[in-house]
Image: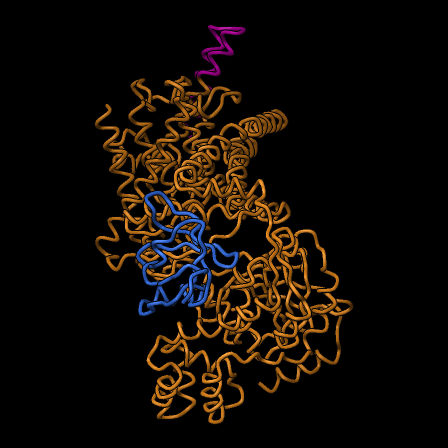
Chain colours: A blue, B orange
């Protein structure tokens, strides 16, 4: 699953990033890298853009970019 | 070269108390409390200028640390040394000592937000590698405590290569004494031990360093490797010799193995950041506070969007409702001053200059100071509290439909106060096409200088009545704001479809926490705005008022004066008492009107009148509008002057004088279609030299300001034409 399909109230960890797009690279500089823990905080009207919490920071990005980040729930094994 | 180094030594030896002995840069993430801390450390000993060639503001101040004083340079907030926006590039150039006219800093004061260590430590690590002495101010420690975050300071200092970490609360001043003391020792201190985080990159940089002059720092080599093509890379490759580019490419292939370099750097650095945080940060679970519950609710899509509209509605309501008593007071004061001077001085040129020219002209503009201050107060508070960033997030989808992104919202909301800071705020937009489209849309937003024109015309010509729940005057004003927004957005859409066609803008934004704005910071900014407005009133508008008065006063017609004297004598024969006074006053008014018509202003107005005749404007309005091209609020001052010369009573307000204005055949000049046309003209027309100048600087071309001017003026003319011709 990707950042674009998170459920509220569950903590996820980023497992891999498809970083060919320069926008995605910029998001990685802002902290969305493998190993970062994220939670869905909110979304704007129509479900886009999305807002995530990451170690106390709030970051917002669009669905189209959220799709490049593969995540898994923190508690799962793997 | 030699000369300056001699001076450098001399200054060092003198150790003056007055002149700053070293330059320290203040660096941190955006919203880390950096500016508040900078204001605390320097107080009022600061000055603001621009960096060469760009409009990024440069804040420099002097801080006292014991018996030495230091120069502090407050850099724009940045997340990393790989510059993404214009402001970040400036910050990076100053830190690396590549800014023309500025020496390499003697030390770095890093502002690290205790509640946002994750991103803060990323930048901190990059700064530690520069080979400069570093001091860390850990801000927001009170907020961190409240959130249950505990930081092991000695462990943090050790992980950061032995630098000093001073916890502070910038808003209250807690911990500042210790920070000052540490600052005093910073300039001569040793650079920190660089925390190793990516051996392959360090090895590659080390290899290159052997073949480069000592002046090239490790960071510059590493940035040349990671950031790739650019000014720095060309510089480094040039120093390496003929095969410089080839060597850099070879090393890149070895270090990054074909992966995007920036992504690789982020992976390595954040691995280190997480290790540090695991070791030094302890999080205690905290109950959700009352305020964070409200914020969480406001973050939900529908309440959030409704909330945004409510906030904007309250702002515009307040601008009108709160300002009225203060405006009435200023207006009454100006008129009292006018009649006092009018009574004290003998009738003649001097009295006319003071009363009709200066007091009527400048007074009619200064009267809008309360409205402007209230508007700016709201904009500043919304920005400082972090709400504008949230507005950008909420509006992203809507903005996307016109080819912009949510990031364009902040410049547009700021433009409701003034398009100049609004256009400057577009710097956060990374893509040039998006940025220019936003710059061209921004001047359509109803700025505080349009407000006086709207307020005057609406108060004079829109009846005070209610339409359903709404006040009709308020409704018209609201309509004008909407008209500006619609025109701005359509312009952006049109441009994005044509001249600025390109890939869809992207959107990624850090959302700052809601914070209570700092009263001191708000007041400092508000005072700055008031000063700019009053300065304009005292210079530009003052000069225009005097020039317009002179154009209306000269040449004095012998014929008109003679005719007046003759008629007055004739009236005195047949009339007496009150009837005579009335007749004389009528004659004087007629004479003044005749004088105005044959004055230089009257002739110029008549000359251009045919151009504006289809809009229903007489020569007085035409000349006022022309005079308003450098700054639109001038039109009020000019109307104040033209209609003061030749009016029956000093008591009458400008709006009642406008209502009484007549064509020679007795029809009123200000009919409803004509007034609506005039309002539309002001909604569209770009009458502001300051906006044109800032457009030129920000787009770095004459093309865009010229296009904007021609486009907006044409649109205004056509809008006014349509309203008058269809309405009459």
- Residue B521 visible in rendering: yes
Q: Which of B465 and B640 is in front in this view?
A: B465
The quadrant where residue B227 appears: bottom left
In the shown orientation, is residue B279 left or right of residue B225? right
Q: Is residue B568 magenta?
A: yes
Residue B271 percent across, percent down from the top left? 49, 72
Residue B449 vs B422, above or below: the answer is above
The quadrant where residue B289 appears: top right
**Range of magenta residues:** B557-586
In the shown orientation, is residue A42 left or right of residue B358? left
Residue B552 vs B207, above or below: the answer is above
Q: Is residue B501 magenta?
A: no
* Residue at the limit of the structure toward the right, as seen here: B67
Residue B472 vs B282, above or below: the answer is above
In the shown orientation, is residue B521 left or right of residue B429? right
| Quarter placement of the N terminus of chain B | bottom right
Q: Which of B198 and B547 is in front in this view?
A: B198
- Residue B689 visible in rendering: no
- Point 51% across, 64% down: residue: B119
- Point 21% across, 27% down: residue: B726
Q: Nearer the viewer, residue B435 or B721?
A: B435
- Point 34% across, 39% down: residue: B484
The mark total stands at 0
Residue A4 percent across, percent down from the top left? 34, 55
* Residue at the limit of the structure toward the front, as seen here: A77
Residue B667 percent across, percent down from the top left? 30, 18
């Amino acid at each position: 699953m990707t950042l674009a399909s998170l459920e509220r109230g569950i903590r996820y960890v980023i497992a891999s990033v498809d970083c060919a797009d320069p926008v995605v690279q910029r998001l990685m500089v802002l902290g969305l890298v493998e190993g970062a823990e994220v939670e869905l905080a909110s979304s704007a009207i129509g479900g886009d853009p999305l807002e995530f919490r990451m170690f106390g920071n709030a970051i917002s990005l669009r669905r189209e970019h959220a799709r490049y980040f593969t995540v898994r729930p923190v508690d799962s094994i793997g | 070269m030699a000369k300056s180094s001699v001076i450098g030594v001399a200054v060092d030896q003198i150790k003056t108390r007055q002149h700053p002995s070293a330059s320290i840069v203040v660096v941190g993430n955006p919203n880390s409390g950096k500016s508040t801390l900078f204001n605390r450390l320097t107080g009022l000993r600061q000055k603001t200028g621009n960096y060469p060639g760009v409009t990024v503001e440069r804040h420099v101040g002097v801080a006292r640390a014991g018996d030495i004083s230091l120069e502090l340079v407050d850099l724009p907030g940045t997340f990393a040394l790989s510059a993404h926006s214009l402001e970040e590039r400036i910050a990076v150039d100053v830190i690396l000592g590549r800014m023309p006219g500025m020496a390499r800093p003697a030390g770095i004061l890093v502002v690290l937000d205790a509640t946002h260590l994750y991103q803060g430590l990323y930048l901190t690590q990059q700064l530690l590698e520069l080979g400069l002495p570093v001091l860390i101010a850990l801000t927001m420690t009170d907020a961190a405590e409240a959130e249950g975050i505990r930081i092991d300071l000695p462990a943090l200092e050790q992980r950061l290569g032995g630098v000093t970490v001073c916890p502070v609360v910038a808003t209250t001043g807690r911990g500042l004494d210790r920070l000052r003391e540490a600052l005093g020792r910073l300039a001569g201190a040793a650079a920190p031990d660089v925390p190793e985080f990516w051996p392959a990159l360090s090895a590659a940089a080390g290899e290159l360093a052997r073949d480069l002059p000592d002046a090239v720092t490790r960071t510059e080599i590493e940035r040349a490797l990671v950031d790739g093509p650019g000014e720095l890379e060309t510089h480094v490759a040039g120093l390496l010799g003929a095969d410089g580019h080839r060597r850099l490419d070879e090393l890149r292939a070895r270090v990054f193995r074909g992966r995007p370099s920036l992504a690789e750097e982020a992976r390595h650095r954040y691995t280190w950041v997480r290790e540090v945080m695991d070791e030094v940060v302890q999080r205690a679970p905290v109950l959700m506070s009352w305020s964070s519950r409200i914020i969480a609710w406001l973050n939900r899509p529908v309440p959030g969007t409704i909330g945004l509209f409510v906030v904007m509605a309250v702002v515009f309501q307040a601008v009108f409702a709160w300002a009225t008593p203060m405006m009435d007071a200023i207006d009454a004061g100006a008129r009292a001053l006018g009649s006092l001077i009018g009574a004290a001085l003998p009738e003649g040129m001097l009295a006319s200059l003071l009363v009709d020219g200066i007091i009527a002209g400048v007074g009619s503009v200064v009267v809008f100071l309360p409205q402007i201050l209230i508007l700016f107060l709201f904009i500043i508070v919304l920005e400082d509290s972090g709400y504008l960033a949230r507005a950008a997030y909420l509006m992203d989808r809507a903005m996307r439909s016109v080819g912009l992104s949510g990031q364009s919202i902040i410049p547009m909301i700021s433009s409701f106060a003034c398009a100049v800071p609004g256009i400057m705020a577009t710097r956060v937009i990374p893509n040039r096409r998006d940025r220019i489209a936003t710059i061209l849309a921004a001047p359509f937003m109803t700025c505080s200088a349009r407000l006086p024109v709207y307020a005057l015309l609406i108060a004079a010509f829109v009846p005070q009545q209610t339409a359903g729940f709404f006040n009709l005057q308020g409704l018209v004003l609201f309509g004008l704001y909407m008209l500006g927004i619609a025109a701005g957005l359509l312009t952006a859409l049109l441009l994005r479809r044509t001249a600025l066609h390109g890939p869809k803008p992207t959107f990624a934004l850090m959302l700052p926490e809601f914070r209570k704005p700092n009263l001191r910071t708000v007041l400092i900014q508000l005072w700055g705005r008031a000063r700019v407005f009053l300065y304009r009133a005292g210079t530009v508008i003052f000069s225009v008022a005097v020039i317009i008065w002179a154009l209306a006063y000269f040449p004095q017609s012998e014929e008109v004066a003679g005719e007046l004297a003759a008629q007055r004598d004739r009236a005195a024969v047949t009339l007496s008492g009150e009837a005579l006074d009335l007749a004389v006053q009528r004659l004087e008014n007629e004479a003044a009107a005749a004088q105005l018509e044959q004055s230089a202003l009257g002739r110029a107005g008549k000359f251009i009148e045919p151009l504006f005749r289809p809009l229903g404007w007489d020569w007085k309005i035409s000349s006022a509008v022309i005079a308003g091209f450098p700054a639109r609020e001038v039109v009020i001052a000019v109307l104040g002057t033209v209609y003061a010369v030749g009016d029956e009573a000093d008591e009458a307000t400008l709006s009642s004088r406008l209502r009484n204005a007549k064509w020679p055949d007795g029809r009123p000049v200000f009919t409803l279609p004509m007034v609506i046309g005039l309002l539309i003209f002001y909604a569209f027309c770009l009458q502001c030299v300051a906006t044109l100048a800032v457009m030129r600087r920000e787009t770095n071309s004459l093309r865009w300001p010229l296009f904007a001017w021609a486009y907006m003026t044409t649109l205004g003319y056509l809008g006014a034409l349509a309203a008058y011709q269809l309405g009459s």
